[in-house]
Image (cartoon, grey):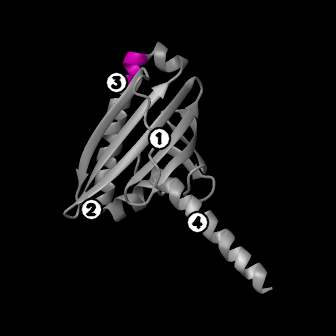
């Protein structure tokens, strides 16, 4: 019984250490060679903890992010967990790749003819949080509609940041 308890404890520590390392590894970079990419930043008058809480509450994105419908996290907020959502009439299946509380949050996403990498970085300075978002999109449709997709991505990122700021500063 004592040996079983020790083995379970050791196993839990190994799993926890693995998750810690996975969450604190380098964030997956966007594809800088992708035909569609954008980066934007905003300063939010709120702590990184508050911004993190709202940003990572995927199931409730649609309560403040007007362009998102039916968001559903399929498990815990950990790397490799998937989530499904809809934006602009497109269903997207995403997989978290980075979950570093109060600092970094990122996922990849697939939709018909597209593959995206989406990253958020939070930097708190004097009670305010600088939020930077980076995204790249690749695939047949991204190449075909490069100009309009870049324009729409820039507009969408701006809207997302403004809505996040509004929600966090309530």
Q: Which mark is residue 28?
A: 1
**Disc 4 to disc 3, C-alpha distance:** 42 Å
Answer yes or no: is residue 42 visible: yes
Q: Is residue 45 above or below residue 29?
A: below
* Range of magenta residues: 146-151
Percent x, y for residue 61? 46, 52
Say which residue label 4 marks.
16
* Element type at mark 4: helix
**Disc 1 to disc 4, C-alpha distance:** 21 Å
* Element type at mark 3: helix
Q: Earlier in the sequence, mark 1 or mark 2?
A: 1
- Decide: marks 3, 2 in contact (CB < 8 A)? no
- Decide: marks 1, 4 in contact (CB < 8 A)? no
Mark 4 vs mark 2: give the one in front: 4
Few, some or many residues within 10 Å of mark 1 (<14, 14–19, 20+): some
Q: Is residue 149 above or below residue 87?
A: above
Say which residue label 2 marks.
46
Q: At 35% across and 63% down in the image, what residue appears?
A: 50
**Disc 1 to disc 2, C-alpha distance:** 26 Å
**Which residue is situated farthest in the left direction here?**
126
Say which residue label 3 marks.
151
**Disc 4 to disc 2, C-alpha distance:** 30 Å
Percent x, y for residue 142? 48, 20
From the viewer's perspective, tell me whether residue 66 is left or right of residue 97: left
**Which residue is situated farthest in the bottom direction here?**
2
Magenta stretch holds residue 117: no
- Quarter of the image for the N terminus: give it: bottom right
**Disc 3 to disc 2, C-alpha distance:** 29 Å
Q: Is residue 17 above or below residue 113?
A: below
Q: Which of marks 4 and 2 is nearer the N terminus?
A: 4
């Amino acid at each position: 019984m004592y040996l079983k308890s020790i083995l379970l404890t050791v196993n839990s520590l190994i799993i926890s250490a693995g998750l810690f390392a996975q969450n604190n590894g380098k964030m997956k970079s966007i594809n800088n060679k992708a035909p569609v990419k954008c980066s934007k930043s905003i300063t939010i008058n709120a702590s990184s903890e508050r911004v993190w809480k709202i940003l990572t509450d995927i199931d409730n994105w649609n309560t403040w992010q007007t362009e998102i419908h039916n968001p559903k996290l399929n498990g815990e907020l950990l790397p490799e967990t998937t989530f499904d959502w809809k934006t602009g009439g497109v269903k997207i299946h995403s997989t978290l790749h980075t979950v570093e509380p109060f600092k970094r949050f990122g996922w990849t996403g697939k939709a018909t003819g597209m593959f995206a990498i989406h990253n958020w970085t939070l930097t708190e300075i004097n009670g305010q949080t600088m939020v930077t978002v980076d995204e790249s999109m690749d695939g047949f449709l991204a190449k075909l509609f490069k100009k309009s997709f870049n324009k729409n991505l820039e507009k969408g990122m701006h809207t997302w940041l403004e809505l996040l700021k509004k929600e966090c500063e309530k």
